[in-house]
Image (cartoon, helix red, strand yellow):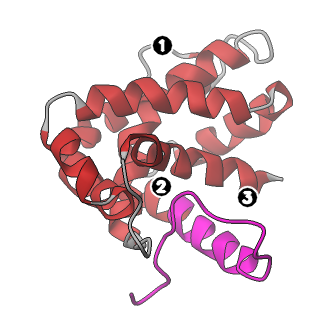
């Protein structure tokens, strides 16, 4: 289901904090919509690189996902620098105080980028390449912040539906609207 795919995209960033923190917070905080959007923007370059590897045999050569120097990717790479402080704030919320020293180091962003791709690849199915390419192509004309906001809004709706099933937990709890 596409909602699970988008959840994986946004929540892969949170796995950095889950695997690094030595003690989980007593009550996991939610990240704000803008923090989740910043996480999406920060993760997109690594995700596109991973998708390019997975989807090369499945997509035509002119596919947006397969364009190595596309304007689409360049927009996200440029925007990720300004999004990082807010993304880091969101990761600190879900990761707790033990994660803060790592987040304050210059290793945090490269570590996040290095983990997002493989974590996403482990969940992504090659049959999702064509629909993902179509989605990326539809979102490409939007500024990165608008595309990220649309994805986060979708994730918030999916997260609300999953609350009815206690067996399903979100790795990246996004606060509801107005929180």
Q: Which mark is residue 3?
A: 3
In the rendered structure, which segment of residues is drawn in magenta?
151-179
The residue positioned 77% from the left and 52% from the top of the image is 2
Q: Mark 1 or mark 3, which is nearer the start of the sequence?
A: 3
* Left or right: where 114 falls relative to 150: left
Q: Which secondary structure lies at badge 2?
A: helix
Q: Position of residue 16 (x, y in %)?
A: 42, 41
**Mark 2, residues whose alpha carbon is within 10 Å: few (<14), some, or many (≥20)?**
some
**Image spot of residue 157 (x, y percent):** 65, 75
Q: Residue at x 14, y 30 (%)?
A: 106
x then y, percent, for residue 100: 20, 50
Q: Residue at x 46, y 28 (%)?
A: 115
How many marks overall? 3
Instruction: State the mark number for residue 68.
Output: 1
Q: For this rendering, which residue is in front, 14 or 95? A: 95
Q: Quadrant of the C terminus?
A: bottom left
Q: Is residue 15 left or right of residue 157?
A: left
- Which residue matches tag 2? 147
- Dot 3 and dot 2 residues touching (CB under 8 Å): no
Please tell me whether mark 1 sits on a helix, a strand or a loop: loop
- The reply to whether the magenta stretch includes residue 144 is no
Q: CA distance from mark 3 to mark 2?
A: 15 Å
Towards the viewer: 99 or 50: 99
């Amino acid at each position: 289901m596409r909602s699970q795919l988008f959840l994986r995209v946004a929540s892969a960033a949170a796995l950095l904090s889950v695997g690094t923190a030595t003690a989980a917070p007593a009550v996991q905080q939610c990240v704000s919509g803008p923090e989740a959007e910043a996480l999406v923007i920060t993760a997109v370059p690594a995700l596109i690189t991973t998708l390019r590897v997975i989807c090369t045999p499945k997509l035509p050569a002119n596919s947006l996902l397969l364009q190595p120097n596309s304007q689409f990717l360049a927009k996200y790479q440029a925007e990720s620098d300004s999004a990082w402080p807010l993304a880091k704030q969101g990761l600190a919320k879900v990761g707790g105080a033990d994660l803060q020293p790592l987040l304050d180091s210059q290793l945090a962003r490269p570590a996040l980028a290095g983990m997002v791709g493989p974590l996403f690849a482990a969940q992504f199915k090659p049959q999702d390449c064509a629909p993902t390419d179509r989605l990326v192509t539809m979102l490409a004309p939007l500024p990165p912040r608008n595309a990220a906001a649309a994805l986060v809004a979708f994730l918030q709706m999916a997260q609300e539906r999953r609350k009815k099933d206690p067996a399903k937990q979100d790795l990246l709890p996004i606060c509801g609207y107005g929180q």
